[in-house]
């Protein structure tokens, strides 16, 4: 009898331990207080622009991106935008949204990320279904590469029609912003000062197209890598410079070994922080 009880207790302890460990994600506010996904979704309603900072290969990010878009689209008129689409592809993206070209043509004409099918196609389908705008906000990558190699001055050589795909020059740039300084530090002296400039031209361009396509009364939901909006820098910094009247909320994604508390380094990096178990599978 004692042996049987010991086995039962052992199994209960194993099951308890397993249930404690297997939790895919939790959401926290900026101060580190845990809250439900429903509470986060309701909180987003107070804002004009949502900057959803993702990990590009994180399935929890991509699932919640769709949920945010769907939830807000059920209650408000919405527009979407994303880092994953470059501004010079806007015309063909529009044609696909309006069903003027088929998927095969879209795949050929638009520079899609390798993980488009698994991670972003559902956002495009949502926009198509509700007839919403989806804005390609990012600078064409070849121009960001030009800045990386030759600084902002390299863009002065572009013809005027191509400058329409980037934020108006010259852009404001603060090299002392912690995110840009950290970028240099992470390269341990092996990088050019132009690296954070290449990041800044992306941030400035995404902010520019968000502002240019924002419609009063709408919710603009923007999807980007978390590093483009963490700590209220990046895109958010440029939005504050150019359109301080917009109410902007940020979401970030982080991974931790323990999702049951928010690590100190992640406190305050965004208004809402999605903490994903570091053992979570990735999409690539």
Image: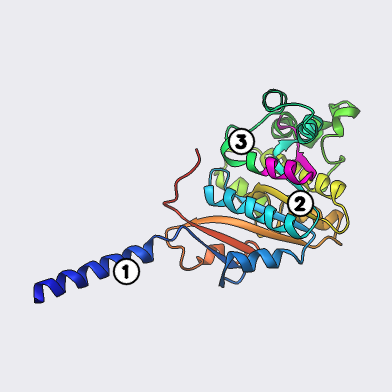
Query: Which residue does the numbered mark 1 point to in the structure image?
Result: 16
**Tag 2's secondary structure?**
loop
The quarter of the image holding the N terminus is bottom left
How many numbered marks does the figure carry? 3
Q: Which mark is residue 174?
A: 2
Q: Is residue 37 above or below residue 253?
A: below
Q: In the rendered structure, does residue 243 fall within the stretch colored magenta?
A: no
| Labelled pair 1, 3 in contact (Cβ < 8 Å) | no
The reply to whether residue 181 is visible in this rendering is no
Image side of residue 48 versus residue 52, left or right: right
Rendered view: 200 above or below 10: above
Name the residue tied to disc 3.
116
Mark 3 Cα-neighbour bin, 10 Å: few <14, some 14–19, many ≥20: some
Where residue 240 appears, x then y in whole percent? 81, 58
Magenta-colored span? 123-141
Which is nearer the eye, 234 or 13? Answer: 13
Q: Disc 1 on helix, strand or loop? A: helix
Which SS class for mark 3? helix
Residue at 77%, 32% (x, y): give it.
99
Q: Earlier in the sequence, mark 1 or mark 3?
A: 1
Question: How far is the residue under mark 3 from the one under mark 2?
Answer: 33 Å
Residue 93 appears at what percent x and percent y? 76, 33
């Amino acid at each position: 009898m004692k042996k049987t009880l010991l086995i039962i207790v052992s199994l209960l302890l194993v099951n308890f331990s397993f249930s404690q460990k297997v939790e895919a994600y939790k959401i926290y506010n900026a101060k580190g207080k845990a809250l439900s996904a429903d509470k986060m979704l309701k909180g987003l309603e107070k804002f004009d622009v949502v900057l959803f900072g993702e990990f590009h290969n994180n399935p929890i990010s991509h699932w919640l991106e769709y949920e945010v878009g769907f939830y807000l689209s059920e209650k408000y008129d919405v527009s979407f935008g994303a880092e994953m689409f470059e501004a010079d592809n806007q015309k063909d993206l529009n044609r696909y949204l309006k069903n003027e070209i088929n998927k095969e043509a879209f795949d050929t004409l638009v520079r899609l990320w390798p993980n488009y099918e698994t991670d972003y196609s559902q956002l495009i389908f949502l926009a198509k279904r509700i007839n919403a705008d989806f804005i390609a906000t990012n600078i064409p990558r070849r121009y960001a590469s030009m800045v990386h190699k030759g600084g902002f001055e390299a863009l002065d050589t572009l013809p005027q029609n191509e400058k329409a795909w980037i934020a108006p020059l010259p852009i404001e740039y603060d090299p002392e912003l912690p995110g840009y300084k950290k970028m240099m530090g992470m390269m341990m002296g092996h990088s050019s000062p132009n690296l954070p400039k290449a990041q800044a031209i992306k941030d400035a361009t995404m902010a520019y197209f968000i502002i240019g396509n924002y419609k009063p009364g709408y919710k603009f939901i923007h999807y980007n890598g978390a590093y483009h909006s963490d700590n209220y820098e990046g895109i958010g910094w440029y939005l504050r410079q150019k359109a301080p009247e917009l109410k902007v909320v940020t979401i970030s994604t982080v991974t931790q070994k323990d999702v049951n508390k928010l690590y100190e380094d992640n406190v305050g990096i965004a208004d809402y922080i999605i903490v994903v178990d570091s053992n979570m599978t990735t999409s690539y």
